[in-house]
Amino acid sequence: MSWQSFPKVELHLHLEGGAPAPFIAGLAAEKHIDIAGIFDERGGYVYRDFYHFLKVYEAACTVLTGPEEFYRLTLAVLEESAKHGVVYSECFLSPDFCGGRDVAAWRDYLAAIKAAADQAERRMGITLRGIVTCIRHFGPDKARETALCAAETMGDFLTGFGMAGAELVGKPGDFAWSFDMAREAGLRLTCHAGEWGGPEMVADTLRDLRPERIGHGVNAIRDLALVDRLAEQGTVLEVCPGSNVFLGAATRTWKGHPIERLRERGVKVTVSTDDPPFFGITMTSDYENLERTFGWDEEVFASVNKVALDAAFCDGATKERIAKRLEATR
Ligand code: ADE
Ligand code: ZN
């Protein structure tokens, strides 16, 4: 079966990480910014490892100089997602790359992203919600400013707060103030953990930051007591298998990926692509690999999408609307 048109819910996609390489190269040419070193001879992104990936990612962001660029980026990303059957997407948005965490500037960037999302919903039938994300290796002080941006702009569109970046830098507790302030403002919480860190990083993150979802979380598999706790508590994992295999987080092979072992043990797993053009993947290719490797069929994919929709940070009316689409178009 072709999985491309199968209706999908994606909870873990970095907006800048969804930027097609030709889109970034085009903006660089328009603005005479020299970032040629981040592309290979075929025009794709090139980097050596995860830390170099973060550098290349940040270099790509230097051409996204204002709200207009983010308007165009959002349309380009949603067009690609819609092409692969995504009907509902939650994207990580980073005030660090949108006006340097200045609240007034951030409002303008967010308005542009929202305008593009409205346009995409009308044109392509895809619904977007935003999760403001601080960047761990930028440190706790910048995370506070980011949390303030999130708290000031939360609402129907901006519904969550989270943290990405280099997981092995600092401790989860260093960011407790930011997560507490976001929680108090009414934002829903998620945090990258257990992508590069071990099970103890997942446990510390749950204890100190109290997110309801974990980004990745795949290294939890190394501690089955923790896996059982995740299952009991109903913690949702935003698993990004294609990203993990490409970057070598937890595994370098599809066969070795823990998503099926986590699911079989009762953990709520979902499927997302993280930064698809950086890894040469799509939601369709991830579904194909999951079918080929673990024999996932329509029933499994439908249940995984239901888990994702239940865990989505949007309001109930939006969930009901998306649920109908998952049912109707299958
Ligand atoms: N930012 C973008 N992609 C990321 C990833 N896979 N892990 C942590 N931070 C990220
Ligand atoms: Zn991520």
Image (tube, rainbow, N blue to C red):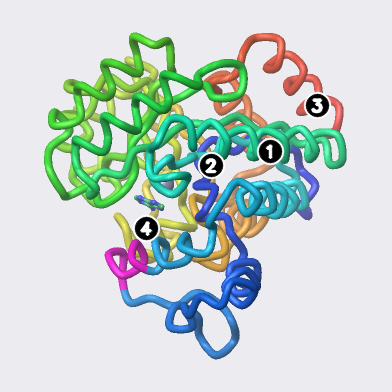
- Residue placed under numbered mark 2 in the picture: 271
Q: Is residue 50 within the magenta segment?
A: yes
Q: Who's the residue at 61% across and 49% down the image?
A: 70
- Residue placed under numbered mark 1 in the picture: 8
| Label 3 residue near ligand 2, CB within 8 Å | no
Q: Earlier in the sequence, mark 4 or mark 1?
A: 1
Q: Which mark, residue 289?
A: none
The quadrant the C terminus occupies is top right
On screen, residue 3 versus residue 294, left or right, reads right
**Residue 233 percent across, percent down from the top left:** 33, 15
SS for dot 4: loop
Q: Main secondary structure of the magenta part?
A: helix
Of marks 2 and 4, the one in the foreground: 2
Q: Earlier in the sequence, mark 3 or mark 2?
A: 2
Gap between marks 2 and 4 measured at Cα: 16 Å
Q: Earlier in the sequence, mark 2 or mark 4?
A: 4
Residues under numbered marks 1 and 2 in contact, where contact means CB atoms less than 8 Å apart:
yes
SS for dot 1: strand
Which kind of residue does numbered mark 2 sit on? Val
Which kind of residue does numbered mark 1 sit on? Lys
Q: Who's the residue at 55% across and 90% down the image?
A: 41
- Viewer-side residue, 97 vs 296: 97
Gap between marks 1 and 2 measured at Cα: 9 Å
